[in-house]
Amino acid sequence: MLIKLAMAVNYTAGGQTGGWDTTTNLQTWASSQSFLVGDNLIFLYAPNHDLLEVSKTDYDSCQASNPIQSYSGGTTTIPLSSPGKKYFICGTLGHCSQGMKVEIDTLAGSASAAASPSANPPASLVTPLVPTPAPESATSSETPASETTSRYCLLHHHLTLHWVILHHPLSFLQLNPLDHFGVGLQLNHLPHQLTKTVSL
């Protein structure tokens, strides 16, 4: 939490090296300041001077006959309680025309002490990244059961046929009434099928 403090400032008319008199360039001093609502403007002056708050028209013409407020006594504190411009002159004859006048422009920013908690930014929502397992690919080396069964049956058939030929040639000739050329063709064809079946 950040706390911003803006303290009211007391300004002495004319600054530390000047004052409310005819020798100080009061308007140059005022233009270099930043007056805020809540600040105070303090006028210190000699007995031969006074302080008048006047309108803009009377300020420009140094007219002291119709003041808004008049002050005397050597020390006057003017609270800057609202934004806007205020106009001050000295009512002593001839002093306003000699430069004893000042325009004060008060800004709207409050100078009173204030606590300003900083807004905490919302905590960012972080979604944890959960790795997604890769889909298991089907094993290409697996052989379907139907194909395995077919290979087994064909191999069994060929082995049985070879056993019959080797051990019972006469039975084979009786079961397969082919001529000798045909039997030779049949026998030459079997090893090729068997070899092809085993290699799959």
Image (cartoon, grey):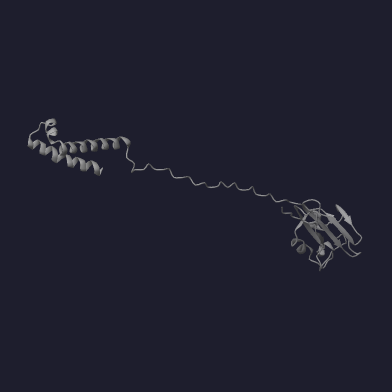
Residue at point 77%, 61% (across, down): 30
Q: Nearer the viewer, residue 169 or 188?
A: 169
Left or right: 27 with respect to 119? right
Residue 126 or 170: which is nearer the viewer? 170
Residue 66 in sight = no
In the picture provided, is 142 more to the left or to the right than 98?
A: left
Foreground: 126 or 161?
A: 161
Would you say residue 70 is visible in this rendering?
A: yes
For this view, does 84 lie left or right of residue 68? left
Residue 35 location, quadrant: bottom right
Measured as percent of width and height from the top left, residue 98 is found at: 82, 65
Q: Where is residue 164 shown, x and y percent of the image?
A: 17, 36
Residue 43 spot, x, y in % from top left: 85, 61
Position of the C terminus by quadrant = top left
Image location of residue 191, percent across then percent down: 17, 42
Q: Nearer the viewer, residue 11 or 30?
A: 11
* Count of residue discs: 0
